Image (tube, grey):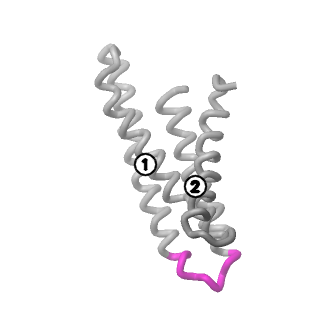
Amino acid sequence: MFTNSYLIALGIPIILVLSGAVAKKLVRGSGWQAKDFYLGVETSLAALGAAMIHFFDLQKQQLSGAQLGEQVTATASFLAIAFFMLLWVLSTHQDWEARTQNIKGQKIWLGGVSNLIGILLFGAFVMLVKGV
């Protein structure tokens, strides 16, 4: 079960989103709200953080020059893309969180699109960069 790369790449960020939503609800101490599930920023940051850790872990690996170069290039490219995607997710949150009168738009952009970007970033890191 834990050898299936799709399960690892997509299952872990989905579990993070669900546990993050529960954590937001528990901290607030009231009933469920749609904004509990707006976790695109958090999942994007998790993917960015995982890639940064991987980048520094590459120093410890016993790879040949060409293999190390490929890994460093892939990780650095992912970090650049993930950083700009994080900025886009942040700007989307900035635009939509204040629009409390448009709940449907918030659910689509913050609960759907932003979360999907974070999940896809995490999945892309696991499958394309880390190579699980």
Mark sitting on residue 34: none
Q: Position of residue 96 (x, y in %)?
A: 55, 75
Question: In this rendering, which labeled residue sits more in front, label 1 or label 2?
Answer: 2
Q: Is residue 25 left or right of residue 64?
A: right
Q: Left or right: where does residue 27 sit relative to residue 111?
A: left
Residue under circle 1?
81
Residue at the image position 58 percent from the left and 48 percent from the top? 16
State the extent of the magenta-drawn residues as a range: 95-104
Q: Report the predominant secondary structure element of the magenta stretch.
A: loop
Q: Name the residue beneath numbered marker 2.
A: 20
Q: Amino acid at mark 1?
A: Ile
In terms of sequence position, does the residue under pointer 1 or pointer 2 come before the other? 2
The location of residue 80, given as percent across then percent down, is 38, 47
Q: Amino acid at mark 2?
A: Gly
Residue 98 on the magenta span: yes
Residue at image x 29%, y 25%?
Answer: 59
Compared with residue 76, is residue 106 higher up or lower down, i.e. above or below?
Answer: below
Residues 8 and 81: in front is 8
Examine the image and state in which quarter residue 99 appears: bottom right
